[in-house]
Amino acid sequence: MEKNNVSKKVTATILSMSLLTVMAGAAIAPALGIIKAHFSDASAMLVQFIVSMPALLIIVTNLFFLPLSRILRTRTIATTGLLLYVVAGAGCFFVDDIYVLLLLRAVLGISVGLVMPLSTGLLAYYFPPEEQARLMGLSAAMNQMGGVVATLLAGLLATIEWNYAFLVYLLGLIALVMVWLWLPDEQLGSANKRGIPFQPRQLLKFHPSVIGMLLLMMIFFIFPTNFAVVATRQLGLRTELITLIMVGLDVVAFFVGMVFGGVMHRFRQSVKYFAPVFFLLGYVAYLVPDVLMVVLGSACIGIANGVGVPYLNTIASIKGGKNSATTVMPLLSAALYLGQFVSPVIVTPASHILFGSTDLTGPYKIGIALCLLFMVQVYFTRHFQSLPPK
């Protein structure tokens, strides 16, 4: 297919895959309490693994995406990934053993590891650099919208019975049909004949974006892992209001992603600082025990996430060129999910050591420190770089 003549159906197909990737863990989060009650004999750690297990397998799969892309064509990779996504995701509906459930969640991680590099890398493959900011913004917006839809739908289904929440993964059938109908069958890996599963040289080349994505996700995930507990204990907010604020954050990030192309062109030299600055404002606002400040802080974090992810994807895809799907995008995907996984592992113990276990806002203070580190990383890796001409 000519890259200058990409149909809207192909673009919609690629973006449909972006709707699904965030659902790997986020979709089940609202039902975790009900799932824990059902598996009352299981340890709290095992139940937590229901959310975090996919992230581990996504990281591993991403690191082996390049050699896989040299063997299989894009439609085969996407079809395999989406079939596994539907079967493993919705298959949990029929399972009543937590170990089998965790096995299916691991398979779900493999499926997202196959799909995610395509959901961003194919945009770099088919479209020139001047169009990628707009499209990466749309991809991030679809990702956020997937989170909103999945969270609300899974929460609603879980009120019927705990296992009904997993039926949300049937949404993958929509993307699967679109892939069968419209996705071109490219051989992406052929352009990287010397590729090996993991190249330190690639990590060195793309380290500003990879480390940036790791920091961004570590900072962002302080919010979903701490917000509900802090808002309940500090402000006495009801679960319904907490859910509304959390969904509102995703909605803000969605709209920011929709207009990201215009934002990046308008603020070409300063947009690199938007994510760390807005994260910083958000977590500073959370230190004030006031509902209005909490809402404003959540909006800031939504803006930071809505700008940060497409910015890093855009810069990396421009640098990686048409080979991005098999080089930098798997690294970014691995960094994204590694950040999600290690955030609570690092932030919670650090908060307890520095501020004590009784300081509910301790994780937010660690978030502020990480924001400053993120800002320093941006300055030393991006400050002297210019975006390509419009």
Image (cartoon, grey):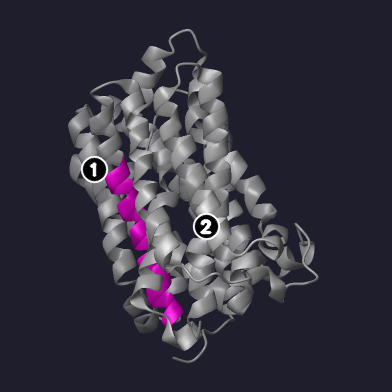
Q: Is residue 133 magenta?
A: yes
The answer to if 146 sits in the magenta stretch is yes
The first of marks 2 and 1 along the sequence is 2
Residue 146 or 366: which is nearer the viewer?
Answer: 146
| CA distance separating discs 2 and 1 | 34 Å
| Secondary element at image label 2 | helix
Q: Is residue 203 left or right of residue 171?
A: right
Is 178 situated left or right of 254 in this image?
right
Residue 369 vertical position relative to residue 36 in the rendered view, above or below:
below
Q: Residue type at mark 2?
A: Ala
- The quarter of the picture where residue 154 lies is top left
Which is the main secondary structure of the residues drawn in magenta? helix
From the image, state whether disc 2 or disc 1 is nearer to you: 2
Q: Residue furthest bottom?
A: 389
For the point 43% across and 65% down, which residue is it? 14
In the shown orientation, is residue 302 left or right of residue 326? left
In-front residue for pair 324/44? 324
Residue 132: horizontal and vertical position, in percent? 45, 77
Instruction: Return the x and y of residue 13 as percentages of the image width and height.
Output: 39, 65
Disc 2 target residue: 78
Crowding around mark 1 (Cα neighbors within 10 Å: few <14, some 14 to 19, many 20+) is: some
Q: Residue 24 placed where, x, y %? A: 45, 42
> Residue at 19% across / 32% down in the picture?
240
Give amino acid for label 1.
Ile
| Residue on which disc 1 sits | 245
Closest to the observer, 275 or 252: 252
Around disc 2, counting alpha carbons within 10 Å, would you say few (fewer than 14), some (14 to 19), or many (20 or more)?
many
Pick out the residue farthest to the top.
Answer: 41
The residue range painted magenta reads 131-150
The quadrant where residue 271 appears: bottom left
Mark 1 lies on a secondary structure that is helix
Residue 134 in view in this figure:
yes
